[in-house]
Image (cartoon, coloured by chain):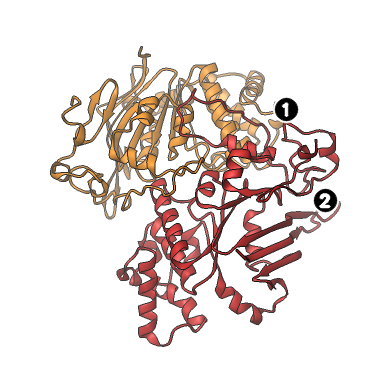
Amino acid sequence: MLAEILLELRNLKTKFKTYDGEVKAADGIDLTVHKKEILGIVGESGCGKSATALSIMRLIPSPPGEVHADKMELNGVELQSLTEKQLSKVRGSEVSMIFQEPSSALNPAFTIGEQLIEVLILHQKLDRGAAHRQAIKALNLVQIPAATQRLADYPHQLSGGMRQRVMLAMACACMPSLLIADEPTTALDVTVQAQILELLCQLQSELNIAIMLITHDLSLVAEIAQRVAVMYAGVVVENASVRNLFAKPRHPYTQGLLASLPLLNAERERLNVIPGGVPNMLNLPKGCRFHPRCPHCRQICRQQEPPLFSQNGSEVRCWLFAREMNK
Amino acid sequence: MSNLLEVRDLKKYYHLGKGVGKEQANVVRAVDGINFAVKKCETLGLVGESGCGKSTAARVILRLLTATAGEILYEGQNIELLSHQQLLPYRRKMQIIFQDQAGSLNPQLTIGSALGEPLRIHRLVIGKKELKAKVEHLLELVGLCSEHMCRYPHELSGGQRQRIALARALALNPQLIVCDEPVSALDVSIQAQIINLLQDLQHKCGLTYIFIAHDLRVVNHISDRIAVMYLGKIVELAGKKALYSGAKHPYTQMLLSSIPRLAPAGQRQRTIFSGELPNPLHPPAGCHFHIRCPHAFVRCTIEEPLMQMIDSDHNVACHLLDK
């Protein structure tokens, strides 16, 4: 049972020109987001997860950035060929994005009402009165108490969790089909994080939107996502359903990440460690990018970059699976 | 085992100015009467949401901030009363590492001179040769090598900088290290490396830790006992097994239930609690937690609950226990 494809990304390459050389933040990313699903994208800092999201939104500044993909289709529309004017129609009403730091994403000089209404007037061509009513609806949707009064508040009058809810209200106000959430709970406390995650799930089922949840925390993905893509140094190394990934992580990096998490029931006396650190993006290792840190590294890993091997909807970029899975 | 550190009724209040348009000067009770003891060679975890006063408590204990009231007994000596000069030997025994490793290292000093500074100030080494040897030893201790001596902080990764911060704390052979969110800013794989290093060093050097973090998973992994703080007060203090399997305070239960688990969706039920940390300027009357508490009753809104011992190693401050 496969739902319709909403976003299809083939061979996305996002490069940045720097004085020290070219940084390939995303180096051949293939991703598919189906309608109404939550896709988790997990990776450590610098692995290119945010660069991928910004490339989809066409928010990478050029220069120094350069985005190229063989295919970047949203609802069958190729995003790369759109003009700036067409893009602004897509942004907000088709795809929208929320960020890690809600306080820096909101304008401190305007009330949240003004900011919400602006979105609605711009994208939905509503008049002020209708936009005002719609804004209250949006705040109710994200469960902000006393929505009418809150419209007159400035961002600094709200707590971090409330600000993130406002961001969500803005992002969902125009009923997009895809919401990109870039580390939406990283700056929040655990109790508030749980509330926001719950809200994301509700929005997904009530509004039928697909969510691309970008995070460094594998357990968040386990909580709410249906599928996961694990990224490392600019490539997707594993792509599987949540159930499969946590039951049987295939890529050594995914295995390492899972084993390095402290568990709450204190079953782990000692944490497993992935030796070394994330490679320098200016100077990536030859062959498989993970080979210097990999416990199963073989000759071929040092020489040749592995392709994505796939089987039953799971994909893994590792030579260990060259025999049992298809290219 | 004897207590290395004991804190009795420690308070830290911040008096805010009257300001324009305000009726009266406000007081923030950042730490409002906390009691605990840390035994030698154990790790005491301190958890709570941001703004609950855990970092303030740590800084007051080290006398980086002066307490408003209360006693801090280090090996039986009340260090709250000591003069700056008298405090020096205690400074050597108590060290701290911070969350922001980049901000806690001087960008203009090489790693070698940053590590050498505490040794020179406390006159623990004589001559350049000995200093160099000692610094090399420190770097080795935290898993780095002598070539890092001439590097600057910006040339190192976050994990390496946290190792340097740890080496600097270790330079004076301390007994107690306060770790203030030491792994919160690090990636998962690096976080595991630092946690393991902290545990190794504890065994090797006989260290005692006060480990502060907002992530209950990390605290639970590394600590022997855990204190849960809410709005300046400790609401539950227990051994980690007791806390995980038998948390009594509704706030601890809420924290535990909020933590994302590594179980795919649908495999477990969770309760989502509503509400957020109230404004610490005007904390609710009675039990500070009652406005978010699902079990609150009349008494909670009037009377503040006192810490009660329910087991040899389990203390809870909640009226539900008497019900």
Question: Nearer the observer, disc 2 or disc 1?
Answer: 1
Residue type (three-letter) at the residue carrying disc 2: Gly
Q: Residue at x 64, y 26 (%)?
A: A143
Identify the secondary structure beneath mark 1. Answer: loop
> What is the CA distance from the residue labelled 2 to the residue labelled 1?
26 Å
Residue A242, placed above or below residue B38: above
Residue B200, placed above or below residue A139: below
Q: Residue at x 49, y 75 (%)?
A: B172
Which colour denotes chain B? red
Q: Position of residue B65 (x, y in %)?
A: 67, 66
Indicate the quadrant where residue B297 lies.
Answer: top right
Q: Position of residue A194 (x, y in %)?
A: 57, 33
Residue type (three-letter) at the residue carrying disc 1: Ala
Chain for disc number 2: B
Query: Farthest bottom residue?
Result: B127
The quadrant the C terminus of chain A occupies is top left
Q: Position of residue B28 (x, y in %)?
A: 75, 54
Q: Residue at x 21, y 49 (%)?
A: A285
Is residue B165 toward the left or the right of residue B91 in the image? left
Q: Could you classify mark 2 by the number of other residues whose Cα lies within 10 Å: few (under 14), some (14-19), or many (20 or more)?
A: few
Q: Which mark is residue A146?
A: 1
Which colour denotes chain A? orange
> How many badges with numbers are in the image?
2
Q: Which residue is mark 2?
A: B21
Q: Nearer the viewer, residue B41 or B126?
A: B41
Identify the secondary structure beneath mark 2. Answer: loop
